[in-house]
Image: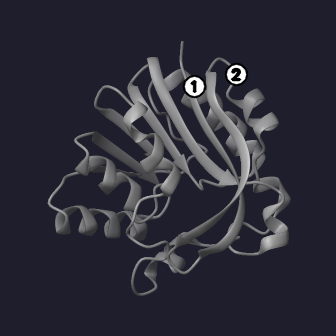
C-alpha cells in the first residue's frame, strides 16, 4: 500500500499544481460557496477552487500533502481549510456542502462505498458531486492510478454507490491526462457530475 506521506515528501508536486481538466470543465455547475474536496493531496484542485471564490475544505490522510496544499494556497494568495483525516472515519457533516469534489480519490471498495453514502448525505439540496477516477481499463494503460482492481470505479458501480443523486454526466472515456509525474498519458476514466434533488 502506497504511503502518501512518502510520495508527497518527494521534491515538487507529484500531480502538478494545475487543476484537473474535468473539474475546470464543470466547476461552474457548483452554485453556492461551500466546497469539500476529499483525497485532496497537495492542493491543486482546492487552490483552484479557492481562486474561483469558493470556500474550500480539503481533506486528506497525508499531513505532508496538505502542508504542500497550504503552501500552494499562500503562494497563490488564497486560503483553504485543511483537515488531516482517514476517509474511513471522516464525517463530512450532513447537508453541509454546495459542492463535493473527488478527483482520483481511490480507496478500497469497503471504505469507498461507505464514504460515498456519507457524501450523498453531506450535500445540500441542489448540491453537486464532481468525480473523476480511473476505471479497470486503466490497468492496460499503466499511466497512473492504483494497481489493485478493487480501487477502480465504473459508471454502473458509482450509480449504485451514489444512489439518491441525479446523474447529469456519467461517462467512461479515454483521454490524455498530464498531471505531474504520476498521471501521464492516455488514460481510462469515469467522469461523474451528479446533483442532489
Side (left or right) of 86 relative to 50 = right
- Please identify the quarter of the rendering in which residue 74 is found: bottom left
Within 10 Å of the Cα at label 1, are there few (<14), some (14-19), or many (20+) other Cα atoms?
many
What label does residue 163 carry, if any?
Answer: 2
Q: Which residue: 54% across, 72% down?
A: 178
- Marks 1 and 2 sit apart, C-alpha to C-alpha, by 8 Å
Q: Which residue: 69% across, 44% down?
A: 111
Secondary structure under tag 1 reads helix
Q: Is residue 128 above or below residue 172?
A: above
Residue 105 percent across, percent down from the top left: 59, 53
Q: Is residue 194 above or below residue 63?
A: above
- Please identify the quarter of the rendering in which residue 18 is found: bottom left
Q: Earlier in the sequence, mark 1 or mark 2?
A: 1
Secondary structure under tag 2 reads loop
**Mark 1–mark 2 CB contact (< 8 Å):** yes
Side (left or right) of 37 relative to 164 = left
Quarter of the image that includes the N terminus: bottom right
Amino acid at each position: 500500500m502506497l504511503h502518501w506521506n512518502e510520495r508527497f515528501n518527494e521534491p515538487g508536486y507529484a500531480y502538478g499544481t494545475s487543476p484537473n481538466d474535468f473539474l475546470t470543465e464543470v466547476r461552474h455547475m457548483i452554485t453556492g460557496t461551500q466546497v469539500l474536496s476529499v483525497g485532496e493531496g497537495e492542493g491543486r484542485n482546492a487552490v483552484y477552487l479557492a481562486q474561483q471564490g469558493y470556500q474550500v475544505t480539503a481533506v486528506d490522510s497525508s499531513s505532508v500533502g496538505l502542508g504542500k496544499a497550504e503552501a500552494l494556497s499562500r503562494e497563490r494568495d488564497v486560503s483553504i481549510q485543511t483537515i488531516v483525516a482517514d476517509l474511513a472515519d471522516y464525517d463530512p457533516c450532513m447537508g453541509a456542502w454546495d459542492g463535493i469534489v473527488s478527483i482520483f480519490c481511490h480507496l478500497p471498495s469497503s471504505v469507498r462505498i461507505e464514504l460515498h453514502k456519507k457524501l450523498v448525505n453531506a450535500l445540500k439540496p441542489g448540491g453537486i458531486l464532481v468525480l473523476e477516477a480511473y476505471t479497470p481499463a486503466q490497468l492496460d494503460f499503466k499511466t497512473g492510478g492504483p494497481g489493485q482492481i478493487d480501487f477502480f470505479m465504473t459508471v454502473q458501480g458509482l450509480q449504485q454507490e451514489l444512489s439518491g443523486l441525479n446523474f447529469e454526466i456519467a461517462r467512461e472515456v479515454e483521454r490524455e491526462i498530464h498531471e505531474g509525474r504520476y498521471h501521464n498519458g492516455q488514460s481510462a476514466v469515469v467522469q461523474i457530475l451528479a446533483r442532489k434533488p
